[in-house]
Image (tube, rainbow, N blue to C red):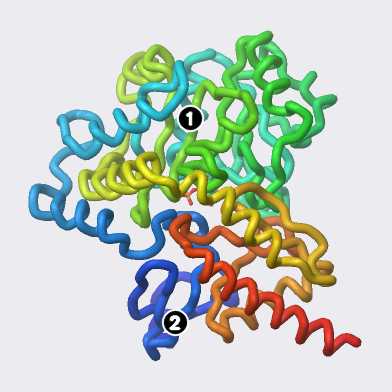
Amino acid sequence: MKSDFFRYQAQTTPHPLAMEISHAIGSYIYDTKNKAYLDFVAGVSACPLGHNHPKVTHAIKKQLDAYLHVMVYGEYIQKPAVELTKLLANNLPDPLEKTYLTNSGTEAIEGALKLAKRATGRSEIIAAHNAYHGNTMGAMSVMGFEERKQAFRPLLPDVQFITFNDASNLEYITTNTACVILETIQGGAGFIEPQNAYLEKVRNCCDTVGALLILDEIQPGIGRTGKLFGFEHYNCIPDILVTGKGLGGGMPIGAFTASGKLMDVLQDKPKLGHITTFGGHPVIAASALATLKEITGGHLMSEALEKETLFRQLLVHPLIKEIRGKGLMLAIITTSEKITNALILKSQEKGLILFWLLFEPKAIRITPPLTISNEEITKGCAIIIEILDEIHNQNH
Ligand SMILES: Cc1ncc(COP(=O)(O)O)c(C=O)c1O
């Protein structure tokens, strides 16, 4: 299968990890030789309940037997999508109430940016350096990393960049600004949390000039930081909330949520302001609904903070400079890019899955399923320390 993978399936890098998957369950992925890998990545935060959670697979199977795709998004009343958007609304603060379901996080970002432009009648968008919001032309226009987007210019005009956590840049937000788009916790940049009431300050500036605030919660959302959404830690409610990844419980989804009044703007002038065939797909919505019920109805969120403490206790080593992030959205920052690369590759050999972050070469992603046990955390961290000891001993 490996040669067919390289020959027929398009690659995104010259060096994919190319692990050949057989099956996955709980916190483990198994390769075709039946080697078990403890998963500290959870499909890059997309599998909050681990792999093949019985409540999720049951909901999917039940929906499979009822109906698959029947109509483009938004025309027919389909129970899984209605129940999902209602449950989201019931777990969100005012005025966030009405949700548009999309096929991916990137598409939800596109929808959110379009909504902001349409609602304000303004064109300027303010985004942050080192931000990642997805890879289509619009989402890439608000990516704060020139190296990865230069080849695709020209992109959207009228995008300004500010430095995350630098309040002195907020003067860029003016009456020309349609929206400010930020990740609540910057992901690709290295899991950077907002500091010194930064998001509150951005919120105030937006309110003063009538600009909309979009928060991208595609990574921190759905319980990963110990609350359903990261913004709940920072006393700042966005006008438009964008979610994805973990919301689908392992299925492809994105969503943007706003007040009913704001969201209804997309219905008209022009009508069909954002349309999609498969957004809100019943099988995917059923998976998301089961996932959201499990996360909002149980102890996984509060446990995420206890598990963070355990990770921080176990991951102490001279080659670890810092652990960043919150809850189960953590990043190990090693002392060099070389050590980071070696640790990720060697951990795979030893049966532990780790992964990189997009723009911070010294960072290692630790975003396990929220369902990971303390024993599994202890086992995985022991592998990390063992590898770091080996690297350390080689160099001394
Ligand atoms: C913060 C953030 N925004 C947007 C996206 C894009 O989501 P998707 O890959 O589902 O299109 C991602 C994906 O990694 C992300 O981390």
Among the two numbered marks 1 and 2 on one chain, the one whose residue lies closer to the N terminus? 2
The residue at which mark 2 appears reads as 36
Rendered residue at 50%/69% (across/down): 39
Residue 183: give x, y in percent of width and height: 61, 38
Task: Quadrant for residue 254, please give it.
Answer: top left
Q: Is residue 64 visible?
A: yes
Q: Residue type at mark 1: give it.
A: Ala
Residue 374: give x, y in percent of width and height: 53, 65
Task: Quadrant for residue 295, please give it.
Answer: top left
Q: Is mark 1 within 8 Å of ligand 1?
A: no
In the displayed structure image, the side of residue 50 where residue 316 appears, left or right = right
Rendered residue at 13%/42% (across/down): 70
Q: Height in image: 31 above or below 298?
A: below
Circle 2 — which element?
A: strand
Camera-nearest label, 1 or 2: 2
Q: Is mark 2 within 8 Å of ligand 1?
A: no
Circle 1 — which element?
A: helix
Q: Which mark is residue 207?
A: none
Of residue 395 and residue 108, the one placed in the foreground of this image is: 395
Q: Is residue 7 visible?
A: no
The residue at which mark 1 appears reads as 112
Marks 1 and 2 sit apart, C-alpha to C-alpha, by 40 Å
Mark 2, Cα crowd under 10 Å, few <14 / some 14-19 / many 20+, is some
Q: How many marks?
A: 2
Q: Height in image: 239 above or below 149?
A: above
Rendered residue at 45%/17% (across/down): 94
Residue 139: give x, y in percent of width and height: 55, 41
Q: Residue type at mark 2: give it.
A: Ala
In the displayed structure image, the side of residue 121 where residue 260 appears, left or right = left
Rendered residue at 33%/15% (across/down): 268
